[in-house]
């Protein structure tokens, strides 16, 4: 697991959530200090087990981590395309917003156009247009990630004009 940031990572913790000795798993959590913005941005990276019982225990650990460390009122965005992620958010007992391709999602992407050099798309929140963005990245997963990033930036108070240049220039990792 890895979390990359050009901004200072103030705290980090890698929690071992291995339940089977041949299936090593970790839950990486960090808090990032963003310029001009409060509160800290909490990031979690986890790759869940392929085995259902282990995965359930790992999801419970993730919910506990969110409940313990993410302050109430801090932006918490959950990809609704993954039902297990929604279960974790509900279990953690914190307010959260959803993003993804499902129709019942708060933050959605619409009108995706592939011009061969990248993608352009419209981000909506509760069916109201937030802005139109472009990215040089291709593919459904990159659109989902771009949606999550744009939703998070908007939740943190950035305008479409502030988000768009970063989205258009990000070439991936």
Image (cartoon, rainbow, N blue to C red):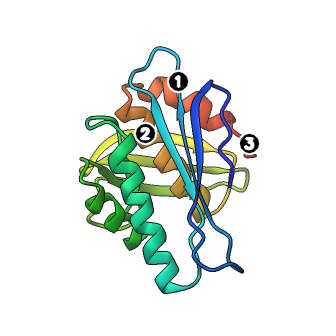
Asked whether residue 101 is in view, the answer is no
Q: Who is closer to the viewer here, 105 or 31?
A: 31
Q: Is residue 148 above or below residue 152?
A: below
The quarter of the rendered structure image containing the N terminus is bottom right
Q: Is residue 157 left or right of residue 164?
A: left
* Image depth: mark 3 or mark 1 in front: 1
Q: Secondary structure at mark 3?
A: loop
Q: Quadrant of residue 5?
A: top right
Are the two marked residues, 3 and 1, in contact with CB atoms closer than 8 angstroms? no
Which residue has dot 2 on it?
152
Q: Which mark is residue 33?
A: 1
Q: Is residue 128 left or right of residue 153?
A: left
Q: Residue at x 41, y 25 (%)?
A: 159
Q: Secondary structure at mark 2?
A: helix
Q: Earlier in the sequence, mark 1 or mark 2?
A: 1
Q: Is residue 84 above or below residue 139?
A: below
Q: Quadrant of residue 164?
A: top right
Q: Secondary structure at mark 1?
A: loop
């Amino acid at each position: 697991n890895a979390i990359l940031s050009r901004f200072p990572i103030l705290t980090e913790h890698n929690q071992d959530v291995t339940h089977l000795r041949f299936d090593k798993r970790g839950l990486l959590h960090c808090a990032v200090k963003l310029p001009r913005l409060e509160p800290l941005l909490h990031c979690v990276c986890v790759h869940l087990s392929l085995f259902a019982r282990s995965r359930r225990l790992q999801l419970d650990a993730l919910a506990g981590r969110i409940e313990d460390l993410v302050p109430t009122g801090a932006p918490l965005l959950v990809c609704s395309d993954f039902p297990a992620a929604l279960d974790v958010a509900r279990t953690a007992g914190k307010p959260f917003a959803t993003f993804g391709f499902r129709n019942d999602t708060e933050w959605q992407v619409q009108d995706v156009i592939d011009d061969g050099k990248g993608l352009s798309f419209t981000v909506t929140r509760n069916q109201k247009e937030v802005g139109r963005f472009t990215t040089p990245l291709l593919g459904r997963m990159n659109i989902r990630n771009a949606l999550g990033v744009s939703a998070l930036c908007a939740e943190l108070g950035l305008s479409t004009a502030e988000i768009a240049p970063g989205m258009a220039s990000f070439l991936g990792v």
